[in-house]
Image: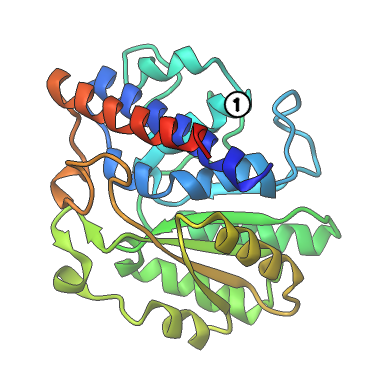
Amino acid sequence: MTNLELQKTANEVRKGIIKGVHAAKAGHPGGSLSAADIFTYLYFEEMNIDPKDPKKADRDRFVLSKGHTAPGLYAALAHRGYFPVEDLTTLRKLGSYLQGHPCMQHVPGVDMSSGSLGQGISVACGMALSAKMSGDSFRVYTLLGDGEIQEGQVWEAAMFAGHRNLDNLCVIVDNNGLQIDGNIADVCSPYPIDKKFEAFNFHVINIDAHDFDQIRAAFKEARETKGQPTAIIAHSVKGKDVSFMENNAGWHGKAPNDEEFAIAMADLEKVGEALCQK
């Protein structure tokens, strides 16, 4: 896909996030919106996947370590064809397969159930090591939150990945700077994030998480890096493209009411209109 096509798709993913969280009257829009471009690139460009065969043996794997941003993953999966886009509005509803955290037993395209912060990267390491031991060619991707990396288990997994030279593992940190309690630097600063991963024998790339040229180049560099895992530090805007949500920690885990929903959708419609004029 061209960068413009990716931008348009990411905008549709963002609309899906807002629709789902609004319908559920609960959820996590801020971090879903900040990661929407990463979700889009992974599922529409980067990963070897097939929505018609979600369990194909040689598919690339993705683990959403920051599982609360399931609305973003669901929106990407739906628009990629894993299940109907209309189902996004069943988010968190009783009986829906789209629950607050992704469940691998019920959601097509989900490779690992997640939600308990810090654990996803450990699972991704296990998948990557398994591929190495079995001689399989698939790659493993995992998305972490920058607040999540305050968890000690993340660094235990990073130490393991670096020690085992898991060059088929790509860790992405959604560095939007905010967590539920406020600025990550004030709560328990993980900075400098890049230097920490480098200390664990990672190849590290810093990018603008909303620039598809940089995203494309980073994933290409990750694929070409041999002998060590890669960490992509994706500098993003929490609540990206929704005016009243941008850089606002209050929208970490809160649903828009009807009036706010209308404003958010109007904001995203304007983004879409601007993209159509390019």
Identify whether 227 is placed above or below 175. Answer: below
Percent position (x, y) of residue 250? 13, 46
Q: Quadrant of residue 171?
A: bottom right
Seen at 21% across and 40% down, the residue is 253
Percent position (x, y) of residue 275? 48, 37
- Which quadrant holds the N terminus? top right
Percent position (x, y) of residue 103? 48, 32
| Label 1 Cα neighbours within 10 Å, binned few <14 / some 14-19 / many ≥20 | many
- Does the image show residue 108? yes
- Does the image show residue 100? no
| Residue at the spot of label 1 | 108
Q: Is residue 236 left or right of 204 when viewed as pictured?
A: left
Amino acid tagged 1: Pro
Seen at 31% across and 60% down, the residue is 176
Identify whether 155 is placed above or below 216. Answer: below
Seen at 81% across and 44% down, the residue is 58
Identify whether 226 is placed above or below 30. Answer: below
Q: Quadrant of residue 125?
A: bottom right
Question: Is residue 163 or residue 51 the one in the foreground?
Answer: 51
